[in-house]
Image (tube, grey):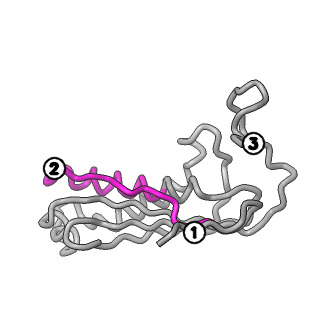
Amino acid sequence: MLTHLDSQGRANMVDVTEKAVTEREATAEARVRMLPQTLQMIVDGEHPKGDVFAVARIAGIQAAKKTSDLIPLCHPLMLTSVKVELGADGQDAVRIVARCKLAGQTGVEMEALTAASVAALTIYDMCKAVDKGMVIEQVRLLEKLGGKSGHYKVEA
């Protein structure tokens, strides 16, 4: 059932007033493929714009907090934790993992996905002068806990 549509098929914000406050957590990932020399420059801390991972981490955290400003029907949430981890994935990619938590009436999947996506976009922005062919890929939900729908975990 698509809960963001009313009985006439119009978009509306889901009413979560009656939902119980529960602990909720979501983990999402994104990958940025790049030239091996671009990744090496990032890992070695030799990028002329500074620490790419630090800037992308901050961007991801900020983005999670602003998700309701970006996605029209998302509820503004009082996140209690946002963690964004970045690291080399092989010789030609960065893997980003974003985790969001709260005690609330609605899930944090969109916040985790937004954090991972914006961190990936930030890496692209910082590195585009040296590698215009980077590819942002595999943005997906890895796991969610809490709420009525329960536990979801992507198959390995």
Residue located beneath label 2 in the image: 129
Whichever of labels 3 and 1 marks the residue nearer the N terminus, that label is 3
The crowding category of the residue bearing disc 1, from other C-alpha atoms within 10 Å (few below 14, some 14 to 19, many at least 20), is few
Q: Secondary structure at mark 1?
A: strand
Whichever of labels 2 and 3 marks the residue nearer the N terminus, that label is 3
Camera sees residue 47: yes
Q: What label does residue 14 carry, if any?
A: 3
Q: Please indicate whether residue 27 sits to the left or right of residue 126 in the image.
A: right
Camera sees residue 100: no
Residue 100 horizontal/vertical position (percent): 58, 65
Q: Quadrant of residue 58?
A: bottom left
The residue sitting at 28% across, 64% down in the picture is 52
User: Which residue type carries mark 2?
Assistant: Ala
Q: Quadrant of the N terminus?
A: top right
User: Which residue type carries mark 1?
Assistant: Lys
Residue located beneath label 1 in the image: 153
